Amino acid sequence: MKIIVGLGNPGKQYEATRHNIGFHVIDELANRLNIPLTQSKFNGMYGISHVGTEKVMLLKPLTYMNLSGECIVPMMDYFEVDDEDLLVIYDDLDLQVGKLRLRQKGSAGGHNGIKSIIQHLGTQEFNRIRIGIDRPTNGMKVPDYVLSKFSDDESAEIGAAVKKSADACEDWLTKSFLEVMNSYNGA
């Protein structure tokens, strides 16, 4: 089984914020793959289905961003999923709005959700898709910025990034992550 996790915060007030870009990709995949997120376990909403020959779980941790590992790791343990079968999608301040970067390992880079996953998983080696949200340029504090909504100018780029991220996730169901990474990082 492969688990695709989108990071975000639960609640209507966070729905369209920069920090919830991972949730948006999971919503896109749920629609494309017809996998409704109707089940709940370990403080996460998820759905499981077969896509071709691959069993796939789509997961939204409901622990709030900074505690994401508290949902993901128990879910992996319960369903006996190996680290290499985990893919985490999240926002990145160090990438231009809408830009994607796929990686197989690395530090948290200041992202508290990733920090939590690394702490609970006990390794930095897991697949990830980082989606650029850029840094604030108007003096806004980072916590306020990541919880703000995208501007109208950014919306088209973010919509394209969500679709492209979902494409990469679908490709990962039939290819190695290294192949997918090489394909999307060069684009």
Image (tube, rainbow, N blue to C red):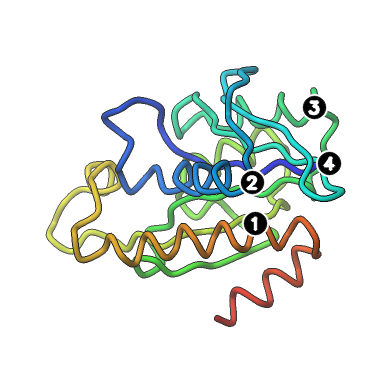
In primary-sequence order, the first of circles 4 and 3 is 3
Please tell me whether mark 4 sits on a helix, a strand or a loop: loop
In primary-sequence order, the first of circles 4 and 2 is 2
Q: Which residue is mark 4?
A: 82
Q: Is residue 38 above or below residue 173?
A: above
Q: Which numbered disc, 1 or 4, marks the residue closer to the eye?
A: 1
| Residue occupying image coordinates x 52% and y 65% | 164
Q: Horizontal and vertical percent for residue 61?
A: 54, 29
Please tell me whether mark 1 sits on a helix, a strand or a loop: helix
Q: Which residue is mark 2?
A: 33
Q: Horizontal and vertical percent for residue 2?
A: 77, 44
> Which of the labelled discs sits on residue 169, or is there none?
1
Q: Are marks 3 and 1 in contact (CB under 8 Å)?
A: no
> Left or right: 183 with respect to 113?
right
Query: What whole-number distance in Å separates the C-alpha atoms at marks 4 and 2?
Result: 22 Å
Task: Give the tally of numbered discs.
Answer: 4
Residue 53 vs residue 145, the one in the foreground: 53
Q: Which residue is mark 3?
A: 77
Q: Residues within 10 Å of mark 2 (few under 14, many from 20)?
A: some
Quadrant where the N terminus sits is: top right
> Which three-letter amino acid code belongs to the residue tagged 4?
Asp
> Which three-letter amino acid code belongs to the residue tagged 2?
Leu
Q: Quadrant of residue 167?
A: bottom right
> Which three-letter amino acid code belongs to the residue tagged 1?
Cys
| Residue occupying image coordinates x 41% and y 32% | 9
Quadrant where the C terminus sits is: bottom right
Query: What whole-number distance in Å separates the C-alpha atoms at marks 2 and 1?
Result: 11 Å
> Which three-letter amino acid code belongs to the residue tagged 3?
Asp
| Residue occupying image coordinates x 44% and y 63% | 161
